[in-house]
Image (spheres, rainbow, N blue to C red):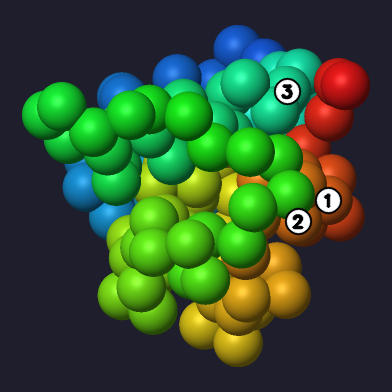
Amino acid sequence: MTSSAYAHASALDFDPSRLKYGFFCRVWRARLLTRAAQTMDVTSTDVKSVIEKLFFRGGQPASVALDADLLATGVCDSMGLVTLAAKLEERFGIRIKDQEITRINLGSVKRIIRFLSAKGVQVRE
């Protein structure tokens, strides 16, 4: 494929799987995933299901209140917040900087929804 073929490809008809592993493949894949995630409607149920799948195993009750502080109630610890951030990145196609992994941004379901909204993800109540 020549460089002129890349110049005429639009974002909608470009297939990143045709590229070999490399920088451009990662860039296009990240852009397409971000675009898809930002058009997805996210609800509190979606966020709660991510938390429940990560932190509730076996016979534990799988219910998290919207305002409950995840750290104070013992649902997760500081490393749990890092794991949660990684899962949110994967699930909703966003990038979370290390400095953003805080109790203020990820401390409860409501805070996570507000954070996702600030990151450009469409949030539906």
- Tell me, yes or no, if residue 99 can be seen here: yes
Q: Which residue is denoted by mark 2 in the rendering? A: 111
Closer to the camera in the image, 124 or 64: 64
Q: Amino acid at mark 3?
A: Thr
Residue farthest toward the top in the current orientation of the protein? 13
- Mark 3 vs 2, N-terminal side: 3
Q: Is residue 10 left or right of residue 55?
A: right
Cβ atoms under marks 1 and 3 closer than 8 Å: no
Q: Callout 2 environment at 10 Å: few (<14), some (14 to 19), or many (20+)? A: some
In front of the other: 111 or 5? 111
- Kind of residue indicated by mark 2: Arg
Q: Are marks 2 and 1 in contact (CB under 8 Å)?
A: yes
* Mark 1 → mark 3, Cα distance in angstroms: 11 Å
In the rendered image, which residue does mark 1 sit on?
A: 114
Q: Where the C terminus falls, by quadrant?
A: top right
Q: What residue sits 33% from the left and 29% below the top?
A: 61
Count numbered badges in the picture: 3
